[in-house]
Image: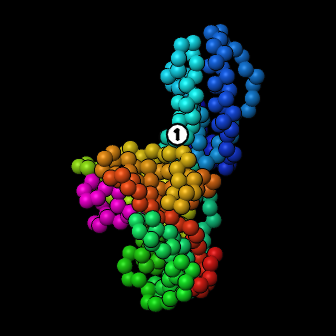
Amino acid sequence: MSELELLRKLRDEVPERPDVRAEERRLLAEIRAGSSSPRRRPARPAPRLRWGLSLAGVGALAVAVVAATQLGGAGGQVNQQAVNQQAVVRLLAAAPVLERAALVAAKSPATEIRQDQWFYLKESQHLGGNLPTYELWSRMDGGRDAVREDGGKLKIGDGEKGPTNPAKTQQELEGLPGDPDALLEHFRNLPNERTPLSICEPRCPAGAEKDVKAFGAIGWYLKYGPIIPPAKAAAMYRALAKIPNVTVEENATDGDGRKGLGVVLDLGTAGKGSYILDPGDYHYLGVKVESDGETRAMSVLASGIVDEPGQMP
């Protein structure tokens, strides 16, 4: 069955996570047995997939185990340390994972938002130094903002007029192309860079500028998850999969140590950017950038739509 046919079959259900550890143990047992004759295994149901780990991912695991065996001594003895290292960091093909994320997003119910309601965001900052965790409330008509730092006093003021104004962001989201190719082209040609954290400072590698701009813009909007129309969120995940050199890293962590799926754009010595997605429903957890031996991160700890400032979803 082709990958396209497999993805089409996945559209009708949200499946369960396969037991990858059991599969690894089975593969190791077969390798150690060293039998040269083919054996028939009892028929068993195909593994049901969850959170984007495709059958190709299980195949990649088999390759990793065989490679670890080849690194061992004579007689096919497995280098267990090499196997363990393979299990810690595992790269998955981006397309199947992000297609699964798109399917989940597309089936999510649309949120009806009134203009007198408020967008709520709680975000932690890991940018060096002792920075506060802050909560932000932004009225959906763009007229008022409220902020609270580290659980302190709530401060209410005029709405921010720049790119973080939720009314402006909502209008931009509704106007974005729904086709992934058109959306990617739109983001690649934005007049100004829009990104939660810059990956390559002060200059990106030649030829990578537009890919970096598109990757950054998608992360910028994913941060506003509760106000993204489902179809536009799905298009964003599919556009991410079309950016060259984007991979998915299993067991990635955000700035607060939460584990998830890292959608990674690696620019080598120029820097590496990752968006961390929840492994269950793929919602955006945060961004992490690694460059020059330093790591910077921002994490979305909570978000939603509420009726007044000070209220939490």
Quadrant where the C terminus is found in the figure: bottom right
Quadrant where the N terminus is found in the figure: top right
Q: Position of residue 265 (x, y in %)?
A: 40, 49
Magenta stretch, main secondary structure, is: loop
Q: Position of residue 158 (x, y in %)?
A: 44, 90
Q: Quadrant of residue 7?
A: top right
Neighbor class of circle 1 (other Cα within 10 Å; few <14, some 14-19, many 20+) is some
The residue that disc 1 covers is 90
Q: Quadrant of residue 282?
A: bottom right
- Residue at the location (54% across, 87% down)? 154
Vertical position of residue 252 compared to residue 34: above or below: below
The residue lying toward the viewer, choosing from 91 and 188, is 91
Q: Is residue 163 left or right of residue 279?
A: left
- Residue at the location (64% across, 25% down)? 27
User: Quick one: which residue is furthest to the top in this view?
Assistant: 37
Indicate the amino acid at tag 1: Arg
Give the SS element for disc 1: strand
Q: Position of residue 232 (x, y in %)?
A: 50, 62
